[in-house]
Image: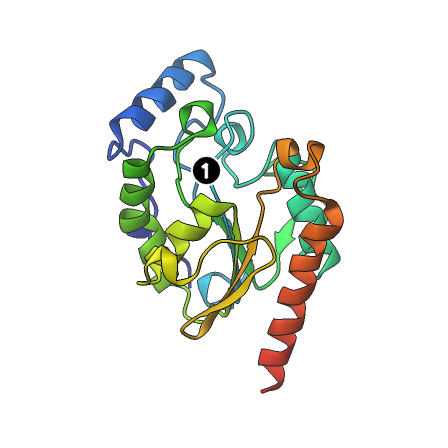
Amino acid sequence: MSIPATVEPPRDCALCPRLSAFVAEWRANEPDWHNAPVPTFLPAGGAEAVRLLIVGLAPGLRGANRTGRPFTGDYAGTLLYETLIDFGFARGRFEARPDDSLELIDAAVTNAVRCVPPENKPVGSEVKTCREAFLRPTLRHLPNLAAIVTLGRIAHDSTVRALGLPASALPFSHGAEQAAGPIRIFSSYHCSRYNTNTGVLTEKMFRDVFARVKGYLGEANSE
């Protein structure tokens, strides 16, 4: 089972005028790029196979906005996908392009905001619009979802709200592990180059989050 097309934003989604105008500008600048909302990256088994969902903030201009696959084309994707491979949530080789041999295993990757925002900064109304139109329905179409990794505060708060809780109920903190009903949320600083270059997030800190996710899903399997 895949996520229905109605749950993914159309190529010419115009729900957020500022984002739509920004995407249109880059279509004119770079007609060979993806330059459209970026769909959720699913494993070969489709939505029913997903037990882990990673939620980022939004496509990077020269990353996912260029390639059309979440976290593909910039440094954040190198750290994310190499970590997923190491912990058994992906296989193949990540080469920062959508036609590489990378495949997800029991995991999916999406963004809280599906279109690239100017300066990588979506505004609150855009986060809310994308949450209600696409993130919340995406969560509903993952019947076996057991764990979510949220990358950064905005993605975390939007995910918590998409699950029907106030953001204050599960506050963001790197390394936090909190229950949202039957789903466990693991929080991490975003794996951006800025965060890693400044030491806000180290590779060990990031890997520690996924080690706990792996342990949790293993325990859930044994119950």
Q: Quadrant of the C terminus?
A: bottom right
User: Which quarter of the rendering shows the N terminus?
Assistant: bottom left
Q: Position of residue 187 (x, y in %)?
A: 55, 56
Out of 132 and 155, give the one closest to the viewer.
155
Quarter of the view holding residue 210:
bottom right
| Residue at point 62%, 85% (across, down) | 222
Q: Nearer the viewer, residue 70 or 43?
A: 70
Instruction: Tell me which residue sits at (75%, 51%) in the image.
Output: 204
The x, y position of residue 133, in whole percent, is 27, 48
Which residue, given by chain and number where applicable, does mark 1 sit on? 58
Residue 165: name its quadrant. Answer: bottom left
Q: Residues within 10 Å of mark 1 (few under 14, many from 20)?
A: many
Residue 68 location, x and y as percent?
Answer: 49, 35
> What secondary structure is marked by label 1?
loop
Q: Quadrant of residue 95?
A: top right
Residue 91 visible in the displayed image: no
Q: Position of residue 67 (x, y in %)?
A: 54, 31
Residue depicted at x 32% and y 48%? 131
In-image side of 59 versus 158 (left or right): right
> Looking at the image, which residue sits at the far bottom?
223
Amino acid under label 1?
Ala
Say left or right for 60 vs 2.
right
Vertically, is 100 above or below 27?
below
| Tally of marks | 1
Visible residue check, residue 139: yes
Colour scheme = rainbow
